[in-house]
Image: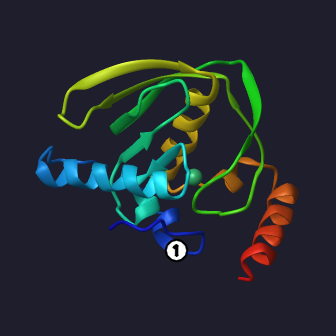
Amino acid sequence: MLEVVTYGNEILEQKAEPVTEFDEQLAETIAQMFEAMKRDHGIGLAAPQVALKKRLFITDVEGDKRRVFINPEIIMTSPELSEYEEGCLSFPGLYFVVKRPASVTIQAYNEKGKPFTLDADGLLARVIQHEYDHLEGKLFIDRIPPMRRERALLHYRRLVKM
Ligand code: NI
């Protein structure tokens, strides 16, 4: 069973490595990631969040199908930005508004190794960017101004009694 790791675990701040084998083990990892995400009521989960240093994330956004993104590249972002209150399974209980491009185009491989391109907007575009950041070792607290970041971390440390 894969468990979600939380802030403080150094893997969350490391760059993940490309997936090279599209095999049974990968399929099993993906199935277990969907289970872990469901258990924690998430709408997106990246492999580093279950302590796997792999360029892979999944999404399950309401009104959309479940999606798997392997070795993804965000190839275009809209100049238009949007603001939305984000949470992260690796920061339980912490929510704050993050500004990001409103839409993105992403290229990735599915679990069978088939490449695809997807244009996303709304909540899906938001989740894709948040999860993609995890593969780069970047966290949502890194996407807000330093003062707000300090306050958010202080609040989080109080929440989890770190
Ligand atoms: Ni997250």
Residue shown at 42%/27% (left/top)? 65
> Residue 75, percent across and down?
45, 24
Residue 99's quadrant in the figure? top right
> Alpha-carbon neighbours of circle 1 within 10 Å: few (<14), some, or many (≥20)?
few
Residue shown at 52%/74% (left/top)? 9
Q: Mark 1 points at which residue?
A: 9
Give the secondary structure at mark 1: loop
Residue shown at 54%/58% (left/top)? 40
In-image side of 43 versus 27 (left or right): right
Q: In this view, does 113 lie above or below 131?
A: above
Residue 89's quadrant in the figure? bottom right
Which quarter of the figure is the N terminus placed in?
Answer: bottom left
In-image side of 98 versus 63 (left or right): right
> Residue 86, percent across and down?
70, 45
Residue shown at 42%/68% (left/top)? 3
Residue 115's quadrant in the figure? top left
User: Closest to the observer: 136 or 120?
Assistant: 120
Q: Is residue 14 above or below residue 57?
A: below
> Residue 124, percent across and down?
56, 29
Which quarter of the figure is the C terminus placed in?
Answer: bottom right
Q: What residue type is labelled 1?
A: Asn
Q: Farthest bottom residue? A: 162
In-image side of 97 versus 107 (left or right): right
Q: How many labels does the image show?
A: 1
User: Closest to the observer: 47 or 61?
Assistant: 61
Q: Is residue 21 above or below residue 119?
A: below
Colouring rule applied to residues = rainbow
In-image side of 161 versus 112 (left or right): right
Q: Is residue 97 above or below residue 92?
A: above
Label 1 CB sits under 8 Å from any ligand 1 atom: no
> Residue 114, percent across and down?
20, 27
